[in-house]
Image: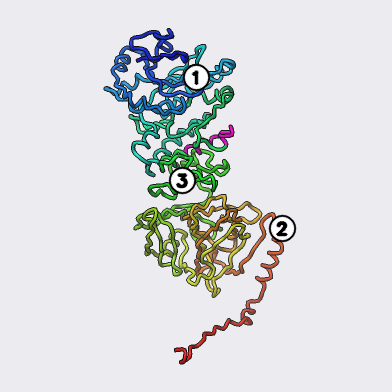
Amino acid sequence: MIVCLDPTCTKPVNPDDAVFCQTCGHPLQLGDRFQAVKLIGQGGFGRTFLAIDRANDQTIQQADNTLINRDQLDQGGIDGWSEDIAATRNIQTRDAKVQSGFCIIKQLLPLQNNLRESTRLFQQEAAQLAKLGQHPQIPKLLTHIEQETALYLVQEYVAGQNLEQVLATQGVFSEAQIRKLLADLLPVLRFIHSQQVVHRDIKPANIIWPSQGERFVLVDFGAAKSLSETVLTQTGTTIGSAGYAAPEQAMGKATFASDLYSLGVTCVHLLTGVHPFDLYSISEDRWVWRQYLTQPISLELRRVLDKLLQRATSQRYDTATAVLQDLRLEATVQASPSVSVTGVSVTGGGSTASLSRPLVEAWRCVQTLTGHQGEITALAVSPDGELIASSHQLSLKANSASVLVKDVRSLISEITGLQQLLPDAELYAGGISLMNEGCYLNPHLDNSHDKSRTHYRVLNLLYYVTPDWQESYGGNLELWDQGLKHPCRTIYSKFNRLVIMATNKTSWHSVSKIRYAGRRCCINNYYFSPQSPDAQDYTHVTSFRGRPDEKLKDTVLRIDTLLRNLAPRSLKNLIRKPQYYKKQQSIQDQ
């Protein structure tokens, strides 16, 4: 069967041996080489055909012997011509090499009243596609042909199923499959973005799982996208697919981050099997995809997907490289020392120069705690520093608590190089910190000693336990160890993050204002040592300062600190300890 390419032909189907259309007389070979055998997609400004490349007799014989699953091709359901390979996955051949005999013909039908501009943009896009096709995960452009009534792109055919079809036949994707998808496609997006190209239509139907090869293939780089920006918008054509397009893209302002947003939507659709329209709550103005998960996924992947789905471009990933780094698929250089201990990010804060061993060199994984059957949802350290109690998720609806016996002090000593650490068993300055919207802490320096003034405060452990807490919500730890005249370093209070901060004479720190209608929770505890961090005797009270732009407040707070540091210690003898009374039960009460 050969299909006539004339868009006005009323009966385009012709026998295999025909040279001209039996209905309209139009030549059946495009460029004396390509013959369309099946219409597989059409839209408002073009059509897509499965075709045979008759470059040589051997290819002709192989292609003619190909067994095509016609039922699969006739299923239809294609919304737009750009979903070019959406219905062609199940082509079966007697010989794997026959695939080289197939290609894809994209027929563009520009408006005749603006043909010159359409042709100019078509030529630009063809040159661009030829360059993009050099990537092994993008179909090659075989040729482009200009005719009076239509423009043609002929691209390599990639045999395989698109991910919408895979979802329908195999069910929802696992975390491993989603990670594989991201690992394969993010480098492709980085490549096309480096060529100053925005795909603008990333969705499951445009991602092919090839029959041969190990990596996913991204399709639909047709010239119609550029053409529609200037010409086809007159017919009301919209760039992108409803549900997958980023908000800024819907307004005609697509950026590289728009492709990352669409990739994120694709991932949550594949994870849940639910259409993106139903994964976003209009009433709450937020994504609710997590409640549709049929199996748990890691916190790391959830956080990455949430950031990909941010509606504000300033809160979203702006490069594919950043996503790869957060997924730990590529190395990243940290501005401050960091190490992963049992899945918890441990970051050095405060001043590091006074430690007996350089803190940068000390950060390494020294112990991995095992025994959990699911994701850790809560963690607590006993006051004496001897036990870690944790709660882990067994399923979506059940949690289980367990206690892991581990000498926390030894673990912290190995990490920091500090010896003779004593935890604050009385929680003199630790505990649970809850901060609501609008709350914050100004730059401050914790008092130098414990309650008895016999041990120096040397470490502060902070463990952030608020699920789904975003960087933009605030409540983040700010380090001013270089002084308040220098910019602070920020450590974001992400869920499941453990921060170990050295405390000494210069470890000024603050907490940024909570800018979210929720509560940030942090569990913290201090560690003390009989040895001074810098081997010098010193003492100071808890001291507060104003921020760099708060000159008056800073002056008042500095005077307050000065007066309290100068107060004679002997005054403590004038302060009587509180008396406690307990009512005695009488014999009659008994």
Judge depth for marks 2 and 1 and give the one in front. 1
Tell me which numbered mark, 3 or 2, is placed earlier along the sequence: 3
- The residue identified by callout 2 is 551
Tell me which numbered mark, 3 or 1, is placed earlier along the sequence: 1
- The residue identified by callout 1 is 108
Give the residues drawn in magenta, as a range.
248-263
Residue 408 point in image, percent of width and height: 42, 64
Discs 3, 2 touching: Cβ within 8 Å: no
Picture layout, residue 270 above or below residue 17: below
| Alpha carbon separation for disc pair 3 and 2 | 46 Å
Quadrant of res 429: bottom right
- The residue identified by callout 3 is 289
| Alpha carbon separation for disc pair 2 and 1 | 65 Å
Q: Confirm whether the magenta stretch covers residue 295.
A: no
Q: In this view, does 313 lie to the left or right of 408?
A: right
Three-letter code, disc 3: Trp
Judge depth for marks 3 and 2 and give the one in front. 3
